[in-house]
């Protein structure tokens, strides 16, 4: 019997090529779970491959480095949050703070979207590589888009200040979990925070 010819490292077999979309989806799902459970530093490409049931070379073939796997995984995870510019655009500017704040906490209060966001923020806080990826996505896809919808001077720094206000509260409420903020009713938080966000975005 002739031995099978080994395929070159990093290249998918014909079967894997035909199953590429499913394989990529499994890798991304495994990556999100690994980064969520272990954080960026303790997650490895080998661990992601094992969780996805594929060879680690296939992970490298589809995504490249661990940083690139992380970026691909979190791009999907933060997709709901990237709808924030639409919340800014739809409606008058004098109520944009309330719309954006309600949109933001709506995402964090939903377990399905909160869990991957927690993993992303924790990784970004603890690892500079993860933080750089996070900044790149947030800056390019979220903050600049929000700023582009504000017809006011210094739109970019206004958008960043509003984001800092909201992310800081999310850190205290969902990650550090400081009471009474952690257990407060979301509507109470929105009522108090929305005017501050409004002032950042459209105030003098």
Image: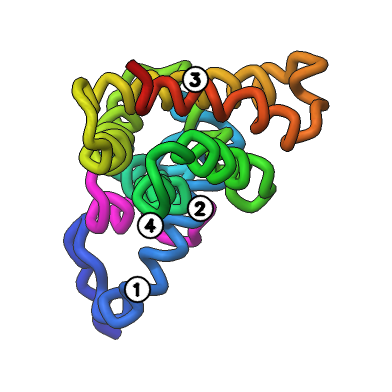
- Helix or strand or loop: what does disc 1 sit on? helix
Question: For mark 3, does the 10 Å Cα neighbourhood hold few (<14), some (14 to 19), or many (20 or more) residues?
Answer: some
Quarter of the picture containing the C terminus is top left
Q: How is the image coloured?
A: rainbow
Q: Is 68 left or right of 92, judged from the image as shown?
A: left
Per the image, label 2 sits on a secondary structure element best described as helix
Residue 61 magenta: yes
| Residue positioned 55% across, 43% down in the render | 116
Residue, disc 3: 165
- Which numbered tag is attached to residue 55? 4
* Residue at the spot of label 1: 21
Q: Position of residue 52 (x, y in %)?
A: 49, 58
Tell me which numbered mark, 3 or 4, is placed earlier along the sequence. Answer: 4
Instruction: List the residue tagged with mark 2.
Output: 30
Which residue is pictured at 35% across the width and 27% down the height? 202
Nearest to N terminus: mark 4 or mark 1: 1
User: Which is more foreground, mark 4 or mark 1?
Assistant: 1
**Residues at marks 1 and 2 touching, judged by CB atoms closer than 8 Å:** no
Residue nearer the viewer, 68 or 112? 112
Left/right of residue 97 with respect to residue 154 in the rendered view: right
Q: Evaluate if marks 3 and 4 touch, with contact meaning CB atoms under 8 Å apart.
A: no
Q: From which residue to which does the magenta span run? A: 50-64
Instruction: Find the distance from the CA under tag 4 to the CA under tag 1.
Output: 16 Å
């Amino acid at each position: 019997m002739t031995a099978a010819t080994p395929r070159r490292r990093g290249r998918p077999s014909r079967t894997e090529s035909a199953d590429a979309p499913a394989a990529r989806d499994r890798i991304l799902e495994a990556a999100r779970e690994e980064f969520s459970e272990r954080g960026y530093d303790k997650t490895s490409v080998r661990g992601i491959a094992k969780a996805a049931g594929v060879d680690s070379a296939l992970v490298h073939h589809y995504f490249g480095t661990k940083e690139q796997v992380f970026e691909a995984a979190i791009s999907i995870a933060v997709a709901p949050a990237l709808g924030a510019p639409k919340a800014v655009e739809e409606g008058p500017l004098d109520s944009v703070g309330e719309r954006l704040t309600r949109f933001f906490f709506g995402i964090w209060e939903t377990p399905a979207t909160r869990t991957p966001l927690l993993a992303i923020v924790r990784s970004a806080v603890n690892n500079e590589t993860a933080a750089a990826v996070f900044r790149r996505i947030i800056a390019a896809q979220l903050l600049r888009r929000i700023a582009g919808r504000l017809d006011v001077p210094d739109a970019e720094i206004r958008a960043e200040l509003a984001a800092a206000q909201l992310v800081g509260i999310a850190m205290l409420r969902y990650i550090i979990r400081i009471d009474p903020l952690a257990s407060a009713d979301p509507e109470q938080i929105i009522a108090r925070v929305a005017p501050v966000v409004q002032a950042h975005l459209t105030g003098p």
